[in-house]
Image (tube, helix red, strand yellow):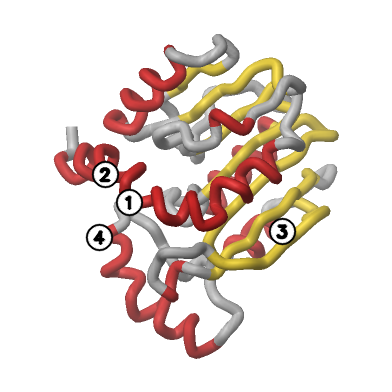
Amino acid sequence: MNLSGRIFAALYDRMMAGTEKAGLADRRRQLLVQARGRVLEIGGGTGANLPWYGEPVDEIVLGEPEEPMARRLERKVAAGDGRARVVRAPAEELPFEDGSFDVVVSTLVLCTVSDQKRALAEIHRVLKAAGRLLFIEHVRSDDAKLARWQDRLVGLNRRIAHGCNCNRDTLAGISGAGFAVADLERGQLEKVPPFVRPLIVGVAEPVSGG
């Protein structure tokens, strides 16, 4: 088991506590009220989204490939209401049949997947035709000066933040993967360095043949 992975999992909730209190938790709540039916969450982490899944959600499958995170997540799931289960799987290799989920949720995950294009293709595959991708992602800045700083600091950030690519144009990635973005809000993460603040929150729907 990777030492850096164990440390990151152990510290993650404390590192994010200020950001959650400064607005991220509210963004999660406002977005996930739209979740219903059978839900897949990629990169479930330590389970920050679990409190915000409402009654319309029948089942929550939490994909988490990192063993230290998955263990923490399983403990939180065990104390829950029985709707959730953990599957150790990366977003790039989802062990589910085509069209098997009503909703896929991704929050601060598409910056860290090793192959974003492949992960989004898998999300598209497992969603039902009328399904929805709900996302909160920090992304490449629209401000050219800040984007250049993101490019300069991405290597350092990957080492510090366990693989996070702060300069990914994730919105373009979502659109390019066969999704139509139905709702989008731009904002910023609080209580974090400027180069990881640019944020998108939204809903995307799979396009037939995408």
Residue assigned mark 4 = 159
Residue assigned mark 3 = 175
Viewer-nearest of discs 2 and 4: 2
- Residue 45 against residue 200 in the figure, above or below: above
Q: Callout 2: 10 Å neighbours few (<14), some, many (20+)?
A: few
Disc 1 vs disc 4: Cβ atoms closer than 8 Å?
A: no
Q: Amino acid at mark 1?
A: Met
Q: Position of residue 174 (x, y in %)?
A: 66, 55
Instruction: Let me know if residue 51 appears in the view.
Output: yes
Q: Amino acid at mark 3?
A: Ser
Q: Amino acid at mark 4?
A: Arg
Q: Is residue 48 left or right of residue 187?
A: left
Viewer-nearest residue: 179 or 31 = 31
Viewer-nearest of discs 3 and 4: 4
Residue assigned mark 1 = 15
Viewer-nearest of discs 3 and 2: 2
Instruction: Let me know if residue 37 appears in the view.
Output: no
Could you tell me which residue is drawn at 56 percent across and 29 percent down? 51
- Residue extending farthest to the bottom is 145
Q: Position of residue 62 (x, y in %)?
A: 51, 27
Could you tell me which residue is drawn at 63 percent across and 67 percent down? 187
Disc 3 vs disc 4: Cβ atoms closer than 8 Å?
A: no
The quarter of the rendered structure image containing the N terminus is top left
Label 1 to label 4, Cα distance in Å?
Answer: 15 Å
Label 2 to label 4, Cα distance in Å?
Answer: 15 Å
Disc 1 vs disc 3: Cβ atoms closer than 8 Å?
A: no
